[in-house]
Structure formats: C-alpha cells, structure tokens
Amino acid sequence: MSRSPLPPFDEAGAVLKVRSAEDGWNTRDPERIALAYSEDSRWRNRSVFLTGRPAIVDFLAGKWERELEYRLIKELWAYTGDVIAVRFAYEYHDAAGQWFRAYGNENWKFDDDGLMTHRHASINDVAIDESERLFFWDHSGPRPSDHPGLTELGL
C-alpha cells in the first residue's frame, strides 16, 4: 500500500501531503486516518508515546470523545527529502461547553511508500470564548477551499 505523494518531496508534494492529512483528520475517523501511518508508526503526541496503528486508532477515538466539534487547519512549515514539518491549529469544545484553540507543531518522517513512520507533536491549548472562534465550516467534512488558512487568519 502506498500513499502519494511519495518522498522525496518537492514543495507541491509537501503541500498536498499536508492538506491530505488535514482533510483526513477532519473526518475524525480513526480507522481511516490510521491507514496513512506505517504499521509500526511511532508517535509522540504531547506527553503520550504510541507505537503502531492499533494504538493510533485507540488514541484518536479517545481524543474525539473529549474534543467535540473539532476543526483543524494545517500549514506546511518546511520539508526536505522524506521529512515534513507542519504548524497547525484546531478548535474544539469539551463536554462542559468550554471552547479551546490548540496550537502546535508536528515533525513527520515517511517511508518510501509515503506512509508516516514518525509523528512528533507539540501542542498547547488555550481556552477561548465561543465569540473568539475562527473555524466555521460544517465539521462533518474537510475545510472548504475558500476558508482561510492559518496565515490568512493571522495565526
């Protein structure tokens, strides 16, 4: 199984890989998302360390039980060969109705088939008022092409 674009990445391929990841995560479908990662993919997400697709699926399922109405925007930061760096922000609310915007950076490493073998994520959550939200598309699908990205939103 391969996931194009494949490394080594050029700018267009890196941008496409980032947008594909964003679109995938915005489905909030752990099984589908996990297919973008190698069978033995290694993650660090904040202070959580995971290895393998089953652990990724479990992690993501729990994440979206807590992070409601999740909407994510990713943006390419840098790339070279088989590595991509991304910055991102996402908005969600908890079960009590408190809204948050999470800001983060990810470093990704890919195998020759375009599957991610390593994901290192550093993330900070900031409580926001509902009136401060910036991500307003239907959360059942990907961000529309005419919705501003992080740079356009001043994030």
Image (spheres, helix red, strand yellow):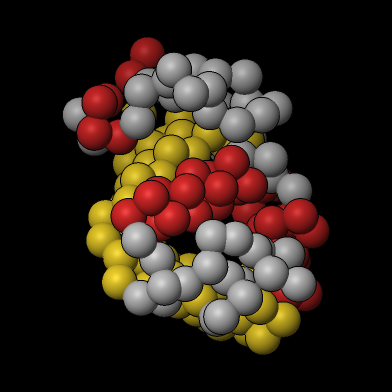
Residue 49, above or below 37: below
Q: Name the quadrant of the C terminus.
A: top left
Residue 94 location in percent, x, y?
A: 57, 37
Relative to 55, is 135 on the left or the right? left
Going 54% across and 60% down the picture, which residue do you hit? Answer: 5
- Give residue 56's quadrant in the image: bottom right
Residue 11, above or below 129: below
Residue 18 location in percent, x, y?
A: 45, 51
Question: Which is more toward the observer, 132 or 86?
Answer: 86
- Give residue 133's quadrant in the image: top left
Residue 21 location in percent, x, y?
A: 55, 51
Residue 126, above or below 41: above
Q: Name the quadrant of the N terminus.
A: bottom right
- Give residue 154's quadrant in the image: top left
Relative to 68, is 75 on the left or the right? left
Residue 80, above or below 127: below
Task: Determine if residue 124 is in view.
Answer: no
Residue 29 location in percent, x, y?
A: 75, 48
Going 46% across and 34% down the picture, which residue do you hit? Answer: 91
Going 40% across and 57% down the picture, which residue do you hit? Answer: 14
Question: Which is more toward the observer, 80 or 55?
Answer: 80
